[in-house]
Image (spheres, rainbow, N blue to C red):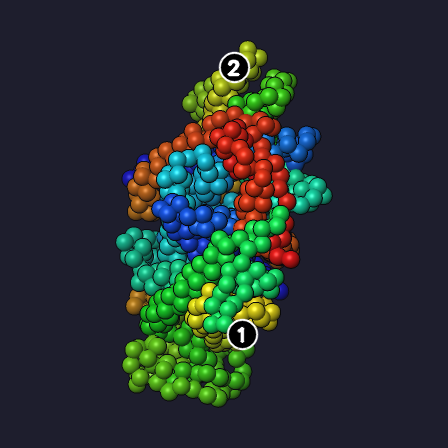
Amino acid sequence: MDWLPTLWFILIALLWTGYLFLEGFDLGIGMQIGLGRGGEKHKRVLLNTIGPVWDGNEVWLLTAGGATFAAFPYWYASLFSALYIPLTLVLVALIFRAVAIEYRGKAQNATTRGLWDLALGWGSLIAAFGVGAMLALTTLGLPLNENGDRVGGPFAWFTWHAVLGGVAVVAFSWIHSVAFLRLKTEGPIRVSSGQRFIRWMPWCVVPLLLWSAVVVLAGTSLAAWTLLVLAVVAAFFAWFSARAGHEGRSFIALGIMLVGAVAAIFVAAFPVVLPSTINSTFDLTIYNASSSPYTLKLMSIVAAFGVPLVLAYQSWSYWVFRKRIGEKHIPEDHLVTSAVK
Amino acid sequence: MDVLEIARWQFGITTVYHFLMVPLTIGLGLTVAVMQTVWHRTGNEQWLRMTKFWGKLFLINFIMGVATGIVQEFQFGMAWSEYSRYVGDVFGAPLAMEALLAFFVESTFLGLWIFGWKKLPRRIHLATIWCASLAAILSAYFILVANSWMQHPVGTELINGRAVMTDAWAVFTNNTALVTFPHTIFGAFAVAGGFLLGISWFHLYRRRKEGIDTIDANGRVVVGEDLSKGRVRDRTDHKVWLTSLRIGAVIATISFFGVALSGHEQAKLMFEQQPMKMAAAEAACHDGTGFSVLTLGKLDTEGATTCDDVVAVFELPGLLSFLANGDFETPVKGVNTLIPEYQEKYGSHYPDDPAFGQYAGEEISYLPVMEVTYWGFRLMITLGGLSAVAAALALWITRKGTVPQSKWLSRLVLLGIAAPFGANSAGWIFTEMGRQPFTVAPNPQMGGVDQVFMYTAASVSPTVSAGEMLFSLITLTLVYGVLLVVELVLLTRYIRGGTGSAMPELLEPEQTSGKDPSDDGDVLAFAY
């Protein structure tokens, strides 16, 4: 059953890719609402493009975490405990973000709403940065001892790798959400997003491609090189098709760039899931970090049934809410008045 | 405080907090689904209003459960990495399944439900709330499978120093899980029942206080109306609250029987599987048959290795044996009988292993903190029982169609909403603290030290510092505190707003009445 850990490595890579693709635009829209400019109606249009789907998208993160726990407990334990402080911040960010999405519309005045916007904006930014840093570190290494525990203190993780990964996911999420808005809105937001995309896209994909290149360079995998080249080609295609006015095509191309870049990272890292920067004999690999074949088999059966089902009903929910929205679709605010005298 | 203590406080605080939101989500979700079904079948406006109003409160609460749930999954790896390594092969599976098979459904279909009003065909829209609320119950099952395995590990062997799953069927049909599941679900419905009852009582009371509803000579309600602008105090409004109240009271009463029966089964299993927890629940130092009503003395047994200076002031003879065995004679083992048994099986001192940190080589205290187990157990039973009696009384009091015009009673009922929440928390604190000093309690049928079990002292992340742990404890506690206030403020505002808070169209009839709804088909039926 040698192929089981490999299968789960692929599945977890897929879950992370799915998470970055789907929650990428959610996080970017959170940043745009909280940290960008625009009137109240404008912000509500942005929020409602992800309104029905953001929570389902976030479950990809939970599933990636849960699957790592189940399939590679040593990877899960070492990575999460090594990144104690940054993950605490990610958790707080995700909490504020989720609550802000649900509660900002329930604010009774502009001040409270402004606070929720800040929570949403910073929450999205910090969550994106933290997840990026975590993924970069799991591919580029942490100072782990032979038990897989971090040495060097609470901030031993803070390296340029972490910053690169963090910036990569923040920048990608932001530009991905700009591309998403082109598809999901009508009127001025669609137009301005189009201009913004053409102007900023080349800059926003650089950190992600750079991170991918760093991992690929460290390895010797030809497949990883191919994927990276594919990602770069897709990036060019995304930009040129955006310029030619093909909104859907450039969105898909940007998505392919993400898939290519992340796949290149995981393929290049294979079979190491978390390298130790102290001694490569302490590296966690898919073989020494994985669960028993029995558990992996059980989880494979569950995934074979569960993953297609999730993809089916999530796709359906995107289909249901496929219509573009603009400011004219946003209902008037209503203040809750007390029914009791 | 050392790392272990801080990590335990953090796990306790975040888990108890998360489980304030969870039972309400579970209980209220299915209740709302039933309400919408009745509306779907009858077309009766009253049930639409109930669906929308309770659905709104459900969502305000749901999001907090979502937000705090992520912390739960992450902190095993963050703060309890040794535990995660040891149990991952078994414990990770139900957690991953929860996310993949249940939480995905819940989140996606709730999104469809919230935004799908008037967008989805009515029948399909109804199906979305059923999918979401049943998925919440499935979630509970997976999480309880994981927790029950910590209480009573089955289907597992110790291989190369870690627990390895050998029989998934045994893990997923663990008898501990099968009795804990109904206990928890009924507990959740008790919470939802109390919630419906308390809030509906408040509105019926306000209708009476404001002179809208009156009572005739026979004590029967005379339902009135207040149709002034911005008020939804029509006759249907009365029906909304009266029906909700009675549904809530019935749910709470039935749930109590479910909780009690499943709790009895749990006690019998606990007596077999975790005898020390049972003894600590009773603060029983010596073997006995009586259920303690009041025990005083030295219950603070933190770190203790014997039990003494505890006096049972008043006992109900035979009842403890009935709870544990189903008869009135067989004595239940006390702490002082059990400690030597545990020491013989699992050793009297922690292994001299760096994994145990400062506890390496120390004497093991097999005795949970009895202050917590004894009073936690009693608080759970008392609050649960009181809520059930109150619910049954409420059914009787409201038989003539409204509530008494008593301010104090109304306040008491509102306060009573907290009782089932308290019972749930107390029960969980009892069962988790009662499992100490283990994170994975040993399965007594499996023998000694060479079997699957884990000490809490060896479960924390070895190189995470006390400073880091304290940072997250303080941060999360502050954030949770602030958000609890926010949630309560919002809930209060929407509760006081009545059905109009969830259905603004009720407040502005003149705006919508003249228009065909299809005219403004462009405007979203719901938007953030």
| Number of other residues with Cα within 10 Å of mark 2, as a class: few under 14, some 14 to 19, many 20 or more | some
- How far from the left and from the top, in percent, is residue B494? 58, 52
In the picture, the quarter occupied by the C terminus of chain B is top right
Q: Nearer the viewer, mark 2 or mark 1?
A: 2
Residue annotated with mark 2: A246
- How far from the left and from the top, in percent, is residue A255? 49, 24
Which residue occupies the extreme right position in the image?
A111
Of residues B147 and B521, which is closer to you in this image? B521
Q: CA distance from mark 2 to mark 1?
A: 68 Å
The answer to whether B1 appears left or right of A319 in the picture is right
Of residues A130 and A315, which is closer to you in this image? A315
The answer to whether B347 appears left or right of B526 in the picture is left
At a point 55% along the width and 13% down the height, the residue shown is: A245
In the picture, the quarter occupied by the N terminus of chain B is bottom right
- How far from the left and from the top, in percent, is residue A36? 67, 31
- Chain for numbered disc 1: B
Residue annotated with mark 1: B302
Compared with residue B180, is residue A264 higher up or lower down, i.e. above or below?
above
